[in-house]
Image (cartoon, rainbow, N blue to C red):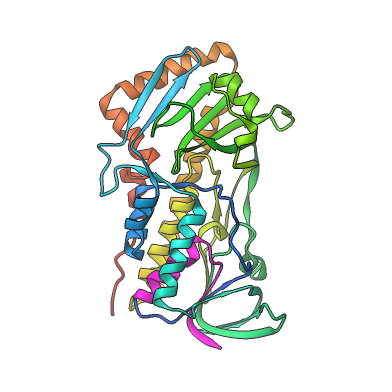
C-alpha cells in the first residue's frame, strides 16, 4: 500500500500534521500502535503559538470552549510576598495559556481527521523497520492488529512517535543529551485553593511547588522533590504552601524525572523526525508540546512547497535551533525551582520581585513564558517556502 505521506504516531503532533497535510491535498496514512488513548494526561498547557497551529487545524475554537484560559501568573515567595505576571500585553490573538488535558486535545484532533479523511488513522499498527529509501520514496513494514506484517510505501515517512521513537531507532539516529537530576511529584485535585484562574509558583527554599488551574474546577499541583524523598505530594504541598490536599480526592498522580535529548538531524533521506521523536526537553515550563506542534506546522508547509529539499534544510536548522532555545529556558526554569540554602532565598526572591515590578522586564518575562518573544518567534516562525 502506498500513500503520499505516512506518519508513525497518532499523538497531538502526528494528528496535527496529518490534518494540515490533508487540507493541502495530500493522501496521508497515520499508524498508531495503541488501540486506545490513555486516560490521564501529563501535558495540559497550550501556549499561544501552539493555538495558532491548532487554529489552522480547525479546532482552536473548540479547544477554547473546553479549556481554561490562564491570563496571569503569580510567584509566591517564602517571605509571604508575591509578584504578579500578566499576559495581557503579549502579541497575537491568544493572550493566554490554555489548560486542557492532552487527551481532550487529542480527541478533537482525531475527530477532525476522521471528518477530513475517514480511513487515514489505523490503530493497533506497530511500525517495525525501514526496508529502503529512494530519491522520492520509502518502504517500511508495519505489524497490524491482526498480527500480519505488511509492507507499506510512501513518498515521505514521518516519525512522530515520541521520545522512545521506533522510527528513530530503526534508522540508528544518535540521541544525544542527558538525564537531569531533578525529580517531581504531580497530581490533580478538586480546586479548593481559592487561587482562581491564576497559575501560581511557590518559590520555597526546599523546592518549588507549581499550581495550575484546570477545567472542571480541578487544579494540578507539581512539587520538586529529592529522588530519595518519601513524603507524599499532599505533605510536600502543605509544608511549602500551607494548602491542604485530600489524597482520597486525587484524580491523577505521577512521579517523573527530567531529561534533555535531541537528534543531530531531523531529516534522513525520505524520513523525517518531529516532536519528541526529535527533541526531548524538560516538561517544566510546558513548552515541549508547543515545539512539536510548531514542527508539524512548519513541515506541512515545506512538504507542500515546490522546492522541498531546499526548504527542508531551512526547516531542520530552524526547528533544532528552537528546540535548543526551549531546552535552555526549561533548564533555567528548573534551576530557579531547585532547593537552595535559606540565606540565598531572600536575595533570589528580591531580584525576581524587582524584575516583575519593571514594566519592560515584566513584559519580556511574560513573552518568554508564553513563547511569544521575538527570539522564539524568529526560531519557530514557519518558513515561507520558495516555489518553483
* Front position in the image: 9 or 188: 188
Q: Is residue 13 magenta?
A: yes
Specify whether residue 69 is painted magenta: no
- Asked whether residue 53 appears in the rendered view, the answer is no
Where 135 falls versus 359 (above or below)? Answer: below
Residue occupying the point 60% across, 15% down: 341
- Identify the residue at the far front of this view: 248
Q: Residue at x 57, y 24 (%)?
A: 244
Q: Which residues are magenta?
A: 1-23
Above/below status of 6 relative to 363: below
Name the quadrant of the N terminus: bottom right
Q: Quadrant of residue 233?
A: top right
Q: Is residue 327 above or below residue 239?
A: below
Residue 239: x and y, percent? 61, 19
Q: Is residue 193 left or right of residue 61?
A: right
Residue drawn where x is 48% and y is 40% of the image: 285
10 to the left or right of 301? right
Q: Nearer the viewer, residue 25 or 218?
A: 218
Quarter of the view holding residue 34: bottom right
Q: Residue furthest bottom?
A: 1
Q: Can you give x and y, in whole percent of width and height, for residue 294 in the image?
A: 41, 58
Figure quadrant of residue 363? top left
Q: Quadrant of the C terminus?
A: bottom left
Residue at screen point 35% across, 19% down: 354
Is residue 210 visible from the viewing direction of this image? yes
Q: Position of residue 358 (x, y in %)?
A: 29, 23
x%, y% of residue 38?
Answer: 60, 57
The number of numbered badges drawn on the structure is 0
Vertical comparison of 352 with 153: above or below: above
Amino acid at each position: 500500500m502506498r500513500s503520499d505521506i505516512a506518519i508513525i504516531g497518532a499523538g497531538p503532533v502526528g494528528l496535527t500534521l496529518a490534518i494540515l497535510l490533508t487540507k493541502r491535498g495530500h493522501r496521508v496514512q497515520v499508524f498508531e500502535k495503541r488501540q486506545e488513548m490513555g486516560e490521564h494526561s501529563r501535558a495540559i498547557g497550550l501556549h499561544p503559538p501552539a493555538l495558532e497551529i491548532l487554529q489552522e487545524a480547525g479546532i482552536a475554537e473548540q479547544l477554547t470552549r473546553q479549556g481554561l484560559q490562564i491570563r496571569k501568573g503569580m510567584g509566591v515567595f517564602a517571605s509571604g510576598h508575591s509578584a504578579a505576571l500578566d499576559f495581557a500585553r503579549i502579541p497575537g490573538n491568544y493572550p493566554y495559556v490554555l489548560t486542557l488535558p492532552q487527551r481532550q486535545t487529542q480527541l478533537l484532533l482525531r475527530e477532525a481527521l476522521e471528518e477530513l479523511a475517514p480511513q487515514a488513522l489505523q490503530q493497533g499498527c506497530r511500525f517495525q523497520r525501514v526496508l529502503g529509501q529512494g530519491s522520492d520514496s520509502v518502504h517500511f513494514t508495519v505489524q497490524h492488529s491482526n498480527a500480519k506484517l505488511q509492507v507499506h510505501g510512501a513518498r515521505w515517512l514521518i516519525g512522530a512517535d515520541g521520545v522512545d521513537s521506533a522510527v528513530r531507532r530503526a534508522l540508528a539516529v544518535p540521541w544525544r543529551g542527558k538525564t537531569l537530576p531533578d525529580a517531581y511529584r504531580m497530581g490533580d485535585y478538586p480546586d479548593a485553593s481559592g487561587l482562581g484562574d491564576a497559575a501560581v509558583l511557590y518559590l520555597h527554599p526546599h523546592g518549588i511547588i507549581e499550581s495550575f488551574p484546570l477545567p472542571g474546577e480541578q487544579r494540578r499541583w507539581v512539587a520538586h522533590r529529592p529522588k530519595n524523598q518519601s513524603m507524599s505530594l499532599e505533605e510536600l504541598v502543605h509544608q511549602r504552601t500551607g494548602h491542604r490536599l485530600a489524597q482520597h480526592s486525587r484524580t491523577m498522580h505521577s512521579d517523573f524525572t527530567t531529561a534533555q535529548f535531541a537528534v543531530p538531524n531531523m531529516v534522513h533521506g525520505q524520513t523525517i523526525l518531529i516532536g519528541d521523536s526529535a527533541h526531548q526537553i524538560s516538561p517544566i515550563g510546558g513548552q515541549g508540546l508547543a515545539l512539536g506542534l510548531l514542527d508539524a506546522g512548519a513541515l506541512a508547509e515545506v512538504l507542500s512547497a515546490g522546492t522541498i529539499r531546499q526548504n527542508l534544510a531551512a526547516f531542520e536548522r530552524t526547528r533544532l535551533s528552537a528546540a535548543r532555545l526551549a531546552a535552555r529556558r526549561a533548564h533555567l526554569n528548573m534551576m530557579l525551582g531547585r532547593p537552595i540554602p535559606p540565606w540565598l532565598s531572600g536575595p533570589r526572591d528580591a531580584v525576581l520581585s524587582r524584575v516583575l515590578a519593571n514594566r519592560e522586564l515584566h513584559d519580556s518575562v511574560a513573552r518568554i513564558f508564553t513563547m511569544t518573544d521575538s527570539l522564539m518567534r524568529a526560531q519557530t516562525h514557519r518558513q515561507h517556502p520558495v516555489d518553483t
